Image (cartoon, rainbow, N blue to C red):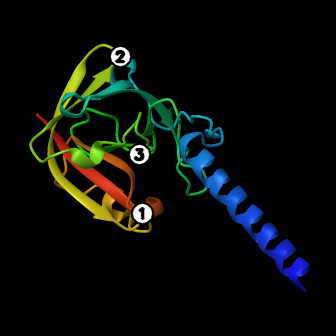
Amino acid sequence: MKLRLWVTSAFLSLVCFTAAGFLIYERFYPLSPVFAAASSEKSTASASVPVNLKISALGIDLPVVAARSVSGRFPTTREGITYLKDSSLPGEPAGVAVFYGHNWPRLLGNLKEIQVGQTITLGLQDSEITYRVDSIVVVSPSEVSVLSPVPDWAGRLILYTCSGFLDSRRLVVTATAI
């Protein structure tokens, strides 16, 4: 009986240790993303293609990768942040450009430190746009309405990342072009 209890305990310990190791590994080295092929529905002027995003106050300077949502999922990159091509183009007079990324220390890990009034600089291929942070909210993962444009939101940027214990919440930063 003691042997059986020991084997069961050892097995459960091994399972828990393996699961914890996988979760830690996946947190810092996720599986490679699958990006949807870009469609030609929206004509994009090369000048409006985002190439990097900087938040000087937080020491964030990241490359931007464009992708479309696939079956309601947001493909991500581990090299920078992702521009949601299903959203408005940066710099358009109407609409919202949505950017999102992992909250890892080398990516958007310190985004939780951002404050209203700080600036975000979005580098385009031949220019840049500076945005001022208007609001910072934390929502549940199912609360995707925060990514939808509001009629009076002209030239806005939304920066979206995971937050909370085991990424159970979403941090949403909204900024307006200045």
Image quadrant in which the N terminus is located: bottom right
Residue 148 seen in the current view = no
Residue found 72% across the figure and 56% down from its top: 18
Mark linked to residue 103: 3
Density class for disc 2 (Cα within 10 Å; few <14, some 14-19, many ≥20) is few
Residue found 36% across the figure and 42% down from its top: 109
Density class for disc 3 (Cα within 10 Å; few <14, some 14-19, many ≥20) is many
**SS under mark 1:** helix
Residue 70 seen in the current view = yes
Density class for disc 1 (Cα within 10 Å; few <14, some 14-19, many ≥20) is few
Image quadrant in which the C terminus is located: top left
Residue found 56% across the figure and 54% down from its top: 73
Reading the chain from its start, which is encountered first: label 2 or label 1?
Answer: 2
Q: Give the residue type at disc 1.
A: Phe
Label 2 close to label 1 by CB (< 8 Å): no
Say if 130 sits above or below 36 in the image: above
Q: Give the residue type at disc 2.
A: Gln
Residue found 34% across the figure and 35% down from its top: 89
User: x and y percent of residue 75 in the render?
Assistant: 56, 44
Mark linked to residue 165: 1
**SS under mark 2:** loop
Say if 37 sits above or below 45 in the image: below
Q: Mark 1 to mark 3: distance in Å?
A: 12 Å
Q: Which residue is mark 2?
A: 125
Residue lying furthest bottom in this view?
A: 1
Q: How many numbered discs, if any?
A: 3
Reading the chain from its start, which is encountered first: label 3 or label 2?
Answer: 3
User: x and y percent of residue 74 in the render?
Assistant: 52, 49
Residue 172 shown left or right of residue 23 in the figure: left
Front residue of 60/44: it is 60
Residue 152 shown left or right of residue 159 in the figure: left
